Amino acid sequence: MKEDNGSANEALGEALNEALNEALNEALFEPKIVGFLCNWCSYAGADKAGGAQKSYPPNVNVVKVMCSGRVDPQFVLKAYDGGADGVLILACHPGDCHYKEGNYRALARHRMLLRMLEQHGIEAARCRFDYVSAGEGDRFVKILTEMVDTVRALGPLKALV
Ligand code: FES
C-alpha cells in the first residue's frame, strides 16, 4: 500500500514538473521568424528602418533574395523544419518588381503554400506574405512587430508531421 502511494506521488510529482516546465516555456517563449526579403525593396526598407534607428523585435533572421519570386516553397518548409516558428515573405509592391512578375508569382505560390502548410498542421498566420518598398521603414517595423506578436500568441511550432 505504502509503495502504491509512493509511486502515485512520484507520478504526480513528474506530471506537476512537466506542467510547470511547459507553462514556463510558454511564458518565456520568443518566436523565431525567418524573413525572406527581396533585395530591391523590402531589404532596402529594412535598411531604412535600421538607418533611422527604429527599434523592432530581434526575432527575425533575414534571408536576402534577389526577388520574392525566388522563394521556393521548399525554402519555407525547410525554415520550419530548421526550427522557425513563423516565416515572413516580403516583396516589392505590385507593379514594382524588378523582374516584372516575380512578386505576382510569389503571391500565387504563397496561396499554394498555405494549403500545403495546412496539411502539415501549420496555421496560416505563421506564414505571412506582404509588401514593403525601399522607403517604407515604418511599414517594415509594423509588419515585423505584428508577425512576432501573432506568432508569440500562437506559441511554439510543434514538429512538422
Ligand atoms: S524584385 Fe522585389 S519582388 Fe521581385
Image (tube, rainbow, N blue to C red):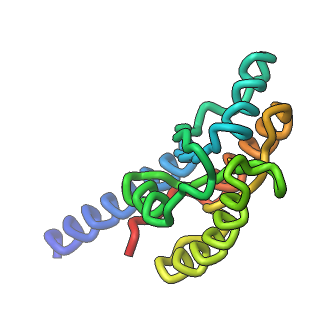
Closest to the observer: 55 or 41?
41
**Residue at left 20%, top 65%?**
6
Q: Position of residue 159 (x, y in %)?
A: 39, 65
Q: Position of residue 52 (x, y in %)?
A: 81, 17
Q: Quadrant of the C terminus?
A: bottom left
Instruction: Please identify the residue farthest to the left as the structure is shown.
Output: 3
Instruction: Look at the image and tell me whether residue 31 can be seen.
Output: no
Q: Position of residue 49 (x, y in %)?
A: 77, 26
Closest to the observer: 72 or 35?
72
- Is residue 41 shown above or below 56? below
**Residue at left 53%, top 38%?**
61
**Residue at left 38%, top 59%?**
81
Left-right relation of 142 to 113: right
Instruction: Look at the image and tell me whether residue 99 can be seen.
Output: yes
State the count of labels.
Answer: 0
Closest to the observer: 86 or 23?
86
Q: Quadrant of the N terminus?
A: bottom left
- Is residue 53 shown above or below 109? above
In which quarter of the view is residue 54 placed?
A: top right
